[in-house]
Image: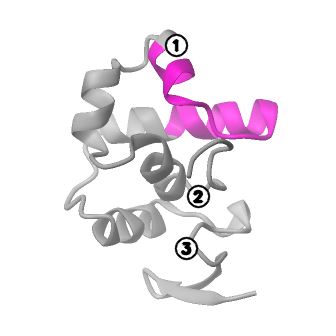
Amino acid sequence: MPQKTLANAAVDVDAEGYLTDFGQWTRDIAAAIAGEEGIAELTPAHWQVLEFMQQEFKAGGQAPSIRKLNKSGVISTKKLYELFPGGPAKKAAKIAGLKKPEGCV
């Protein structure tokens, strides 16, 4: 299993750079992944989405879809695309330390 250094910590990742061990995730690692994904700073709105995604993952074993995020009332689809441009479900899951959402290419 490949490893990567993020925020001065070695973490286990898959071939696409998603963490394979959620227990290794920290807010500093999230910020490092966000930087790699072109997001310079994680705002409170970003953290709200990331925390919701983690709660859903812990409850159901998978990251929520864009549709579920929108229906949750946490964030609108438009705002989600603004916060996580170029693939919001994949980027948000990656930054949240979750596996790639099912159905994402």
The picture places residue 66, in percent across and down from the top left corner, at 49, 28
Disc 1 and disc 2 in contact, CB within 8 angstroms: no
Q: Amino acid at mark 1?
A: Ser
What residue is pinned by disc 1? 72
Whether the magenta-drawn stretch holds residue 90 is answered as: no
Q: Where residue 93 sits: x, y (%)?
A: 53, 49
Q: Residue at x 44, y 62 (%)?
A: 30
Mark in the foreground, 3 or 2: 3
Disc 3 marks a residue whose amino acid type is Gly
Q: CA distance from mark 1 to mark 2?
A: 20 Å
Q: Residues within 10 Å of mark 1 (few under 14, many from 20)?
A: few
Q: Residue at x 26, y 40 (%)?
A: 83
Q: Which residue position holds label 3?
A: 17
Residue under pointer 2:
97
**Secondary-structure class at tag 2:** loop
Magenta region: 51-70
